[in-house]
Amino acid sequence: MRRPVALRLQAALGTLALAAATGVVLAMPEAAAAAGGATGYATQNGGTTGGAGGQTVRATTGTAIHQALCGRADSATPITIEVEGTINHGNTSKVSGDSCSTAADKIELKQISNVTIVGVGSGAVFDQLGIHIRESSNIIIQNVTVRNVKKSGSPTSNGGDAIGMESGVRNVWVDHTTLEASGGESAGFDGLFDMKDNTQYVTLSYSVLRNSGRGGLIGSSESDRSNGYVTFHHNKYENIDSRTPLLRGGTSHIYNNHYASLNESGINSRAGAKAKVDSNYFEDSKDVLGTFYTDQAGYWQVAGNIFDNVTWSEPGDDTNPAGPDPRSNTTVSIPYSYALDDASCVPAVVAATAGANKGLKVSDGSCAPQNPDPTPTDPDPTDPTEPSPDPTDPTDPPSGTNLSLGAGADGSSKANGTSYGNVRDGDPATHWSPAGTTGSVSVKWPSPTTVSKVRVREAAGSEGAIRSYRLVDHGTGRVLATGSGAGVAGFPAVSLTKLTLEITGASGTPKVAEFETYAG
């Protein structure tokens, strides 16, 4: 049986006290997991478990967090990093290693997977230092405060975002956090919780976002519509000018949040976005739902919300408020189960549960705060987004035409002297490599193409470098298959226009000579 975190820390207290001054990363005797289990869209696409099952270490500086990431066997080795104290520019340095890609001015979770960062003890505060998640998957951030991250002035960090995600990010659960600023863009701050450039399957739960010009966004521009499947529940948005959140494309589920003092606008669904807005409590605010600052419409399904002292603008060319009598203009299907509190008790429930250092209490839909489950909930084995078994042996050599020949190709940052096109040119003597040990490369077609099997061929001399990978339908974000080592993988036939190979773990720099695709 896993012992509570407090007991494990007590057992190692003497050693930890010795290391506290230096922030040295120390291995704990047992693996730990984030309390409770992921909820919302973070449970889909295979689920979000973070560093569960891996080593647990303790860190009291940003440098120690980076050392923990860089000290793993590879970039996909599970790890839980328990953080206590104040993390700032003065104690955060760049650390190098094959399993990490860090920076001195932020907590950098780049090209990695299977990581939990959780605040413990007297609390974890990231002061003027943002958390940046890029080209990564299966990340949990829990029970931390991130405050006063600036994009201008001094010091700057993470483009001014408290937590920012971009570039093919998948499966992130941010829970029981406090994200705050001390003003708007003119004071040097940007968003508290931003997602862009193909970020999917994210949940923000039981968190406080306050005192900022911008709450957060999904999509960096009207054309950045590759993001989505994001859940926001039991959060408190307070004294925010706008973007609670701003949605550009994609699908969001927004339920049981408490909104107070939204000064200019709130949930801004635009550019084709669809939001299910369930049983939230809005008070003392303006234009809490609609399409604002654009003529590109977004959509919403509303039910059970309470609007308490909310004012609404008149419709205009770039203003389409949902009120004063909000009605649904779309329907949104939610693929997971959830317990819904009545909107009338949301302010009390959120006040008792949301934010860092609140005991990780949650709601079960009864309007009464509950203690969290001691261990994460396993993903639903019947989850329709999970890959189904291939009725044939996936390691059988593929037959037929290699559909990658003549197709297009792109991907994440590539190493010098390599080309994306080398993976679909039929020449095993040429190759593509990512800029680090992990990255992604895609083949794409001008029209839907049916694929059910792939073969990944490594360049001569580099065989065995690829340790773990995922095959992803780029258009939907669905994981079609996962595996370890290059070779052949099969999955139920799917029609798509872009198939992505995400290398999530490698020993050294992988070299992909050919990324072959087949119909059967």
Image: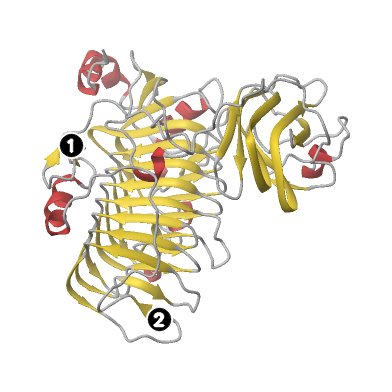
Give, as a three-letter code, the residue at label 2.
Thr
Give, as a three-letter code, the residue at label 1.
Gly
Residue drawn at (53%, 38%) of the image: 102
Where, by quadrant of the figure, is residue 517 drawn? Answer: top right
Q: Which residue carries the number 1 mark? A: 359
Instruction: Specify whether 408 is left or right of 326.
Output: right
Q: In this orientation, does residue 148 appear?
A: no
Q: Quadrant of the N terminus?
A: top left
Badge 2 element:
strand
Question: In this view of the protein, which residue sits in the foreground, 98 or 328?
Answer: 328
Badge 1 element:
loop
Instruction: Specify whether 226 is left or right of 217.
Output: right
Residue drawn at (55%, 32%) of the image: 100
| Relative image position of residue 330 (x, y in whole percent) | 40, 66
Q: Mark 2 to mark 1: distance in Å?
A: 41 Å
Mark 2 vs 1, N-terminal side: 2
| Relative image position of residue 48 (x, y in whole percent) | 41, 35
Residue drawn at (40%, 41%) of the image: 42
Residue drawn at (71%, 28%) of the image: 510
Q: Which residue carries the number 2 mark? A: 319
| Relative image position of residue 134 (x, y in whole percent) | 53, 44
Does 507 appear above or below 103?
above
Question: In this view of the protein, which residue sits in the foreground, 246 or 162?
Answer: 246
